Image (spheres, rainbow, N blue to C red):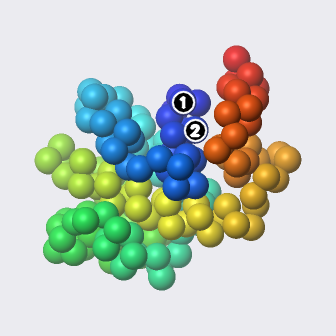
Amino acid sequence: MKIEQEIMLNKYGQRIITHEPLVSSFIEMNTSEQDSFMNDFLFVIMQSKPLDEDIENAIGGSGLKSTFTPCTLLKKGVDNNNLKKIIQLPENEKLKSFRLLLELYKIAYQRRFEIERNHPNKWWYWDLTNPDIENKIYSLYN
C-alpha cells in the first residue's frame, strides 16, 4: 500500500475526509491493484482491532443491504478468516466489499485513535488535520 493511500485511510478514520475519495481511488485501480490493496487493507483493519460488536454499525454505515454477500459474511464475525473471505469475493462484489470494510475500519480505528492519539511511535494515530504532521509523515517515507 502506498503511503498516500495509508494517509487517506487514516484521514477517513479520523473523519477528516469522506469515503468518496477512497472509493474513487479504488475504482480507478485495475483488478490486480485492487486485490493487492485489499490484502494490505485487511492487515490495516486487523491492526485496528475490530470487534464483533462493530458489525451491525459497519453494515448500517456502509449503506449496503444486510442481505448482500459481504454483509452476510461479516455477520459471521470479524476474525481474519471471515474478512479474508470478503476480500476474495468475485469481481462484482469488490466495491460492496470495499465499502463495508471501510466502515468496519472506521469504527475500529476511531476506538483505537481515542486510546493511541498522538502516540510518538505510531504516526497513523497522529492528528492529520495538521498539514505539518502530514508533511512530517511523508518525509519519514521519502
Name the one closer to the observer, 71 or 18: 18
On the rendered structure, is 119 left or right of 82?
right
Read off the residue under disc 1.
4
Work out whether 35 lies above or below 62.
Answer: above
Q: Amino acid at mark 1?
A: Glu
**Percent x, y of residue 11:** 55, 46
Residue depicted at x 74% and y 67%: 115
On the rendered structure, is 125 left or right of 36?
right
Read off the residue under disc 2.
7
Name the one closer to the observer, 89 or 45: 45
Q: Residue furthest right?
A: 120
Across the whole image, how many numbered discs are drawn on residues?
Answer: 2
On the rendered structure, is 92 left or right of 95?
left
Asked where in the image residue 31 lies, by quadrant, the reply is top left
Work out whether 1 lies above or below 48.
Answer: above
- Callout 2 touching callout 1 (CB < 8 Å): yes
Residue 95 in sight in this render: yes
**Numbered disc 2: secondary structure:** helix
